[in-house]
Amino acid sequence: MRRTIITSLGLVALVCGCQQLAIMTYHATGGDTIEAKFKLTTGRVAVVFDDYEGLVTVPQTFREFQERLRQNFIANDVKTQLIPFEEWRKLQQGDATYDGLSVREIGEKLGADQVLHLRVTDFRLRREPAAPIFNGRFAVRVSVISTERKREVRLWPTQEGGEEIVGETHPEPADGDTTPQDVARQLAADLADKVAKLFYAHKEKS
C-alpha cells in the first residue's frame, strides 16, 4: 500500500513537472504560432487609404504608417514590393478623376498587382475632446484587392467590409512634452505593426 502511494505521488510529480516544463517552453519560444491570414503577392502592392471623412488630422500619419509597414515586411521576410508612398500621393493629388476611381482602378493606375486597402473609421488623439490626456485611437478596415479586370476583385477577406484593426497609444498628459505629431506617429507605428502581422506567421505574445 505504501509503495502504491509513493508511486502515485511520483507520477503526480512527474505530470506536474512536465506541465511546468511545457509552460516554460511555451514562454521561452514566444507562444503559439499564428499563421498569416493572407499571403500577399511578391509583386507590386499599393497601399491605399480611404479617409473621405477627413478623420486623420495629422497628414504625415499616412507616410509614417507605410514606412513602418515596409520595415516590418523587410524584418519578417515578406517579399512584397510596396509601391512608394509618393506615387500614391501624387496620383491622389494630381488626378482630377481620383475620387471617382474604384480601388482596383487606383491600383491599376499605380501599376500594382494588388492593393492593400485601408478604410479609416476612427482617428483620435484624445478619446474625449476636452480630456487633459492624449490617448490615441486609429481604426481601419483592411482588405486586399486584385487589380485584374474581373468581376470579383476582393481577395481577402471574403466578407465585405474588411478586417477591423485598431492602433492605440498609452495615456500621456497633454500638457507635457508630447505633441499631437508624436501621438500620431505612435498610432501609425502601432497600426502598421498590427496590419503587417496579418500577412506573415508570428508568435503569439504571452
Image (cartoon, helix red, strand yellow):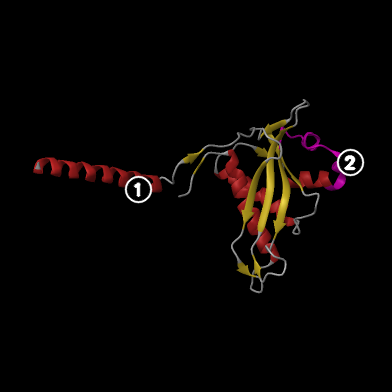
The residue indicated by pointer 2 is: 97
Q: Counting other residues with Cα less than 10 Å from the Cα at mark 1, is it few (<14), some (14-19), or many (20 or more)? A: few
Q: Amino acid at mark 1?
A: Met
Residue type at tag 2: Thr
Query: Farthest front residue?
Result: 1
- As for residue 97 lying within the magenta part, the answer is yes
Relative height, residue 151 to residue 173 (above, below)? above
Q: Position of residue 53 (x, y in %)?
A: 80, 52
In percent of the image, x 35 and y 48: which residue is there?
A: 24
Residue 11 position in % (x across, y down): 21, 41
Say which of marks 2 and 1 sits in front. Answer: 1
Q: Is residue 81 above or below residue 65?
A: above
Give the Cα separation between the discs numbered 2 and 1.
58 Å
The residue lying at 75 percent from left, 31 percent from top is: 147
Choose between 133 and 148: the one closer to the eye. 133
Q: Position of residue 75 (x, y in %)?
A: 55, 45
Residue 95, above or below 59? above
| Left or right: residue 13 compared with residue 53 | left
Dot 1 corresponds to which residue?
24
Q: Give SS at disc 2.
A: loop
Residue closer to the observer: 12 or 170: 12
Query: Is 205 in front, or is 131?
Result: 131
Q: Which quadrant would residue 57 be assigned to in this image?
A: bottom right
Q: Earlier in the sequence, mark 2 or mark 1?
A: 1
Residue numbers of the magenta segment: 93-115
Q: Secondary structure at mark 1?
A: helix
The residue furthest top is: 150
Check the picture and name the quadrant holding the N terminus. Answer: top left
Q: Which picture quadrant has residue 169?
A: bottom right
